[in-house]
Amino acid sequence: MSPSAIRRPRPSPIADDGDQLRFCSTCAFSDACLSQGFDKNSLNDLHVLVEHVGPVREGEHIFREGDEFTAIAAVRAGTVKTYVIDPSGHEQVLGFFLPGEVIGLNAISQSRYPCNAIALDTVMLCRFSFPKMALLATRLPGLQAQLFKLLSQDIGKAALLAGDYSADERMAAFLVALSRRYAQRGFSATRFHLTMARTDMANYLRLAPETVSRVLRRFQDEGMVLVERRELEIRDPARLNELARMVLRD
Amino acid sequence: MTAMTAIPPFDADLLRRYDRPGPRYTSYPTAPQFTPAFGGAAFRDVARMSNGDPIPRRLSLYVHVPFCFSPCFYCGCNRVITRDHNRAAIYLDRLVREIGMVAPLFDRDRDVIQLHLGGGTPNFLDAGQLGELMETLHRHFHFSDAANRDISIELDPRCISANDIDALAFMGFNRASLGVQDFDPAVQAAVNRIQSVEETLAVLEACRRNRFRSINIDLIYGLPGQNRAGFGRTLDTVVAARPDRLAIYSYAHLPQMFRAQKQIDEALLPSAEDKLGLLQLAIEKLTQAGYVYIGMDHFALPGDELSTALENGTLHRNFMGYTTHAESDLIGFGVSAISHIGDSYSQNPRDLPSWEDAIDAGHLPVWRGMAMDADDVLRADLIQQLMCRGVIDIAALEERHNIHFLAYFEDDLRRLLPLAADGLVEVDEQQVSATERGRLLLRIIAACFDRYLHQPASEPARFSKAI
């Protein structure tokens, strides 16, 4: 018996790929389209080019700051990190994008991408030509609403961690937000793989890498989480939520 | 778990039947699986990856000192025989450079929880040189302040003074392992290792005076000229000295692999039957003296941390043997040293010139290694459970590795059937457990789960016999 045959299925953050007729399970737009009575077939009829891209390997860029903006892309599998290099040459992590989430939205107001996007592991994408998407949105109010929603979420995400919060609150908010985002796409809310390196996490949370580990170790000692290498299990969601409440403005 | 701490009963018939070659599983997969495709670049990658964990593992360090003043004929270790003490300074100089190259690959906030100096003879370096080595390590790594950190060294009692031990304690060493093998003068002559009881006990006393947390003594059974009377006296002497830990290794006569062993007169080697008798004698005497069986070749006093760890299920095993420290990343320095970073193994060149050339060229001296796949990680976990607890908890393993145990290990469990029939192991729906009879043969049980031993077409590796 081959080992692969006897691995148990475990919900993993890899999107279920769609086909000619079905949307990918994590598609950011399928609900909006379907609710308007457009299935994938009718989208094809509208010549909305949906282009599957990838695999993009770990460490490869998807776009770079200043590249001409032509498309937004939904992550189908893997994790994408966006970042900028500040004037003193330091990297600043802007965000992490999980399966089902859309990158490039912050370029919409400009003609060029305002940041870099890099694959943290093996990434698969779904690219939408933005002009065509915008055109389609004028005919599908639901799609337009969905685009606005994604845009406002993207802006909110960046503002979230800018406040004057403690390291504990930042870390808790980060974990709770990840948990909710995974849950939204049908993955486990309490067990997930942290694809970002400690330095990326620290950079994003504006903490020192040592602080990330120290806080997580304390969370672990207090029974809130269990960390084994890159695997994270949330053991006390209630307490973690409570810590995250201020940051997430629940 | 109370039954677990007792020394398992001796069963001559069983041990005779299972006296066959097999790996010792200080690692899984074992070193013969390492390949040169895994080199310096791969080492940098796994080090970087290991720093990226949200809580990076703590570090264990191993430093190999290959030199010995004279050859013990039984030895299968990687060593260089010389009386030229200048070689120590030259070697140390390169070690310092290696540490300087490797240490920056690991984040500074990763505490060192364990350091072990092995050989060869680590005390081939004099106290001043060992001090320089320690100073270098402390400059490049942050050592844990935890009370249970282990700073240990293998000592040849024939070439160390009480003053040296004071110096070692001052440098932070808190554990020592003394090589003895056998005090019987006839055996000592046959293996070219003349060492008196007095000088050995003096070193042990000096370690105690310096409040070392534990002292280990190594003995070997199956040596040329060894008999029950002589080995019995050795055991009585050693047990009376009450070392915290005892290792009783089986002598593996593999002269094709270890050239020094060609000097051993095979006519003097005890028969398989006599060798078993020596093991039985050791087990009887250690049982009477109240020692606890830790696993494989290791015994400890009931109050020792290893015994406590065995009892509460926190025992671990790595290249340095049994330890109380949970998973850490191991960095090996010096010729032939092995590293275990994340899910990878890597090894420095086994011959001194190759290691020296790499250091002199400013390269990481990684000779070979391997990146473990998911199956390797699963089997390593399983074998670790077996070696440290004598039990595989099926549900826990299924949960950790996302498998159906019975289906995944169908072939392995079939290999286990004859062992089960012999009463070495019991399998039910909850667990696979070594019986009391089977605990002296853990490596035979573990070997059933070794994928590489049961691959056709692969060249059989040479391992020493189980007993």
Image (cartoon, rainbow, N blue to C red):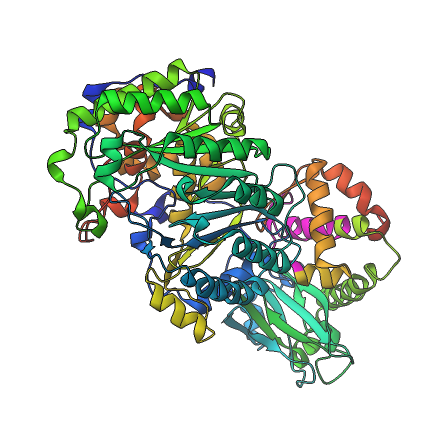
Examine the rendering and report whether any part of residue B427 can be seen.
Answer: no
Q: Nearer the viewer, residue B373 or A51?
A: B373
Query: Residue furthest toward the top?
Result: B288
Residue depicted at 68% across the width and 70% down the height = A82
Q: Tell me the quarter of the picture where residue A200 sits.
A: bottom right
- Residue span colored magenta: A172-198
Q: Tell me the quarter of the picture where residue A143 sits.
A: bottom right
Q: Residue B80: horizontal and vertical position, in percent? A: 33, 56
Query: Residue furthest toward the left?
Result: B267
Q: Residue B465: horizontal and vertical position, in percent? A: 22, 37
Q: Is residue B448 left or right of residue A210?
A: left
Examine the rendering and report whether any part of residue A109 can be seen.
Answer: yes
Magenta stretch containing residue B232, yes or no? no
Q: Is residue B88 left or right of residue B249?
A: right
Q: Is residue B33 left or right of residue A69?
A: left
Q: Residue B161: horizontal and vertical position, in percent? A: 49, 42
Q: Nearer the viewer, residue B105 or A58?
A: B105
Q: Is residue B154 left or right of residue B111?
A: left
Q: Residue A92: horizontal and vertical position, in percent? A: 74, 70
Count of marks, rendered view? 0
Residue depicted at 33% across the width and 54% down the height = B79
